[in-house]
Image: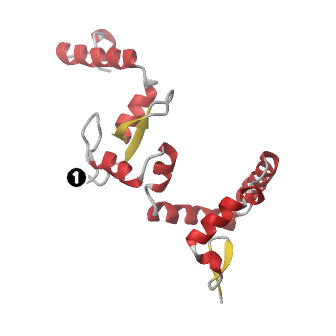
Amino acid sequence: MTAWIGLYNWCMTAPRRDPEYMRKYYEANRGKWKLTPEQRAQKNAKRRQRYAEDAEFRERTNRQVAESRKRHPLSRRAWTYGLSKDEIEFLIDRGCQICHANPHADPTVKMHIDHDHKTGMVRGALCQSCNLALGHLGDDPIRAMAMYDYIMRAANNGSSGADSMTNRTR
């Protein structure tokens, strides 16, 4: 009996169903499975072309990706940042490091892992709004302080300092 799992045809009784066996097999035969950069580029070009032209393939691919993300929401983030799923969960459970939004208190809060783009080091978890704001500032602390000063001046003065331009009524 065979069963389809993803794109691969697996025999349910074969020893390759054993994850440990498969891990050892792939480690021993790495060169056999690795594509050259040219082969990878050609394969990706074919996939992109099929994705662009075949609506059924595109829908199936999008559905599979969405299902995979629902089943394994932390896997990609853990792999991307070299952290364990437990470490990712710990960061997210602490909430946003800037505004303290908590995804457990408000399920609409989307959390992102923040990292330094120069070093790749993870700094913490941020809500989507704070992550976007930090990204637009270019991770520049001087710009962040200038923005803070601007907002504080406006709050203290009751305006941005350009009263004649911003407070006009039409």
Q: Residue at x 74, y 52 (%)?
A: 44
* Disc 1 residue type (three-letter): Ala
Q: Nearer the viewer, residue 99 or 87?
A: 87
Q: Quadrant of residue 70?
A: bottom left
Would residue 167 be visible to someone looking at this image? no
Q: Residues within 10 Å of mark 1 (few under 14, many from 20)?
A: few
Q: Tell me if 66 is positioned left or right of 35 in this view.
A: left
Depicted 102 relative to depicted 62: above or below: above
Q: Residue at x 64, y 79 (%)?
A: 15
Depicted 29 relative to depicted 147: above or below: below
**Residue 162 horizontal/vertical position (percent):** 31, 10
Q: Tell me if 64 is positioned left or right of 129 in this view.
A: right
Residue at the spot of label 1: 105
Q: Tell me if 42 is positioned left or right of 138 in this view.
A: right
**Residue 2 horizontal/vertical position (percent):** 66, 85
Q: Nearer the viewer, residue 48 or 94?
A: 94
Depicted 89 relative to depicted 64: above or below: above
